[in-house]
Amino acid sequence: MTFKNKLTKAHKELEDAGIWRSNYNPPPLDLLRKIGYRILPPHYRSFLVNFISQTLFFTTIWGGIMWLLVWQAEHVAGYFALLVSISVGLFMGFCMAVYYKFSAKHHHLSDWSDFK
């Protein structure tokens, strides 16, 4: 079965489970898929992959916004801003990975390999 067919079945299963579309197909993932990356919905990825990807995403986006809107104007030291961004990113990455793992188990979702 092709990736696109598996993705369609996974999206159908997620929709049938009552999970919001923005939860299982967030805009950044949708954009990456449109340019050719084969990325699984977060509910079907491992805890570690979700933790790393969410940490990197949140650290970069939140840290960048905080630097541009707050820290730069307050003359916050770069190393401190980086440390805070990484700390908050790790916390949010962990929370999101736990959420996706709990949600997949709570809704009794199939494994990605089960789609045939």
Image: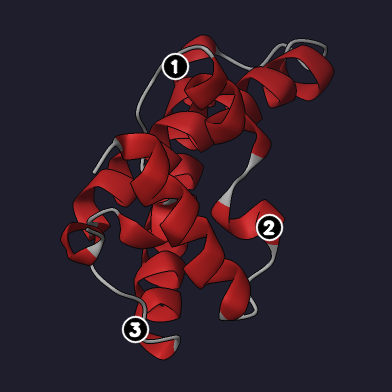
> Would residue 6 be seen by someone viewing this image from the given angle?
yes
How crowded pointer 3 is (Cα within 10 Å; few <14, some 14-19, many 20+) is rated as few
Image check: 74 left or right of 82?
Answer: right
> Which numbered tag is attached to residue 21?
2
Q: Which residue lies at the image location 42% right of the left edge and 53% below the top edge?
A: 42
Q: Report the coloring of the rendering.
A: secondary structure
Measured from the top left, where is residue 72 in percent x and y? 74, 10
Asked if the residue under mark 1 is in contact with the one under mark 2, i.e. CB atoms within 8 Å, the reply is: no
Q: Quadrant of the C terminus?
A: bottom left
- Mark 1 element type: helix
Return the residue at label 3.
105
Q: Is residue 98 above or below residue 1?
A: below
> Which numbered tag is attached to residue 79?
1
Q: Which residue lies at the image location 59% right of the left edge and 32% below the top edge?
A: 30
State the residue in front, 95 or 4.
4
Measured from the top left, where is residue 54 in percent x and y? 43, 42
Q: Which residue lies at the image location 76% right of the left edge and 13% below the top edge?
A: 68
